[in-house]
């Protein structure tokens, strides 16, 4: 995982593209510190660095909801805004998905 200065989610999305980063698979924007977190690792976990933020993953899975940022499509798999939901769970719960519309992990079958 690398971190770079960033101004917005859109700025981070652009940093997650060639030629800036050749194999970027996910990113997160930390607004409090104006930092983009970028990774090549599939299913990377940003929770230790940004436990309340959105994680954007590159995806072309059409049966899941995608968000578009500057013409690029990403799948939000983790969202934490309230912070009330515990993410300390077993692997099966992560595979199945859990949460509500504000704090969630989408899982494999959502």
Image (tube, rainbow, N blue to C red):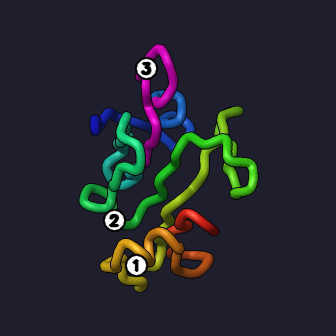
Answer left or right for 62 relative to 39.
Answer: right
**Which residue sits at x=43%, y=60%?**
53
Q: Residues within 10 Å of mark 1 (few under 14, many from 20)?
A: few
Which of the two marks, 3 or 1, is nearer to us in this view? 3
Q: Residues within 10 Å of mark 3 (few under 14, many from 20)?
A: few
Circle 3 SS class? loop
Residue identified by numbered label 2: 51
Q: Residues within 10 Å of mark 2 (few under 14, many from 20)?
A: some
Please provide the residue range marked out in magenta: 16-28
Residue identified by numbered label 3: 22
Does 1 sit above or below residue 67? Answer: above
Residue 43 spot, x, y in % from top left: 41, 50
Residue 27 belongs to magenta span: yes
Dot 3 and dot 1 residues touching (CB under 8 Å): no
Dot 2 and dot 1 residues touching (CB under 8 Å): yes
Dot 3 and dot 2 residues touching (CB under 8 Å): no
- Residue reaching furthest to the front: 92
74 vs 32, nearest the viewer: 74
**Which residue sits at x=39%, y=66%?**
52
Circle 2 SS class? loop
The numbered mark, 2 or 1, whose residue comes first in the sequence reads 2
The numbered mark, 3 or 1, whose residue comes first in the sequence reads 3
Measured Cα–Cα span from mark 2 to mark 1: 8 Å
Residue identified by numbered label 1: 83
Circle 1 SS class? loop
**Which residue sits at x=47%, y=14%?**
19
Answer left or right for 2 relative to 57.
Answer: left
- Residue reaching furthest to the left: 48
If the image is split into quadrants, where does the C terminus sit?
A: bottom right
Residue 35 spot, x, y in % from top left: 34, 42
27 vs 6, nearest the viewer: 27
Measured Cα–Cα span from mark 3 to mark 1: 33 Å
């Amino acid at each position: 995982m690398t971190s770079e200065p960033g101004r917005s989610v859109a700025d981070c999305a652009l940093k997650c593209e060639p030629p800036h980063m050749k194999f970027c698979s996910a990113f997160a924007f930390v607004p409090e510190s104006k930092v983009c977190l970028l990774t090549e690792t599939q299913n990377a976990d940003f929770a230790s660095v940004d436990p309340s933020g959105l994680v954007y993953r590159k995806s072309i899975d059409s049966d899941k909801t995608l968000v578009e940022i500057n013409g690029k499509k990403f799948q939000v798999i983790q969202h934490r805004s309230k912070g009330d939901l515990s993410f300390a769970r077993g692997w099966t719960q992560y595979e199945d998905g859990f949460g509500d519309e504000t704090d969630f992990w989408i899982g494999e079958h959502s």
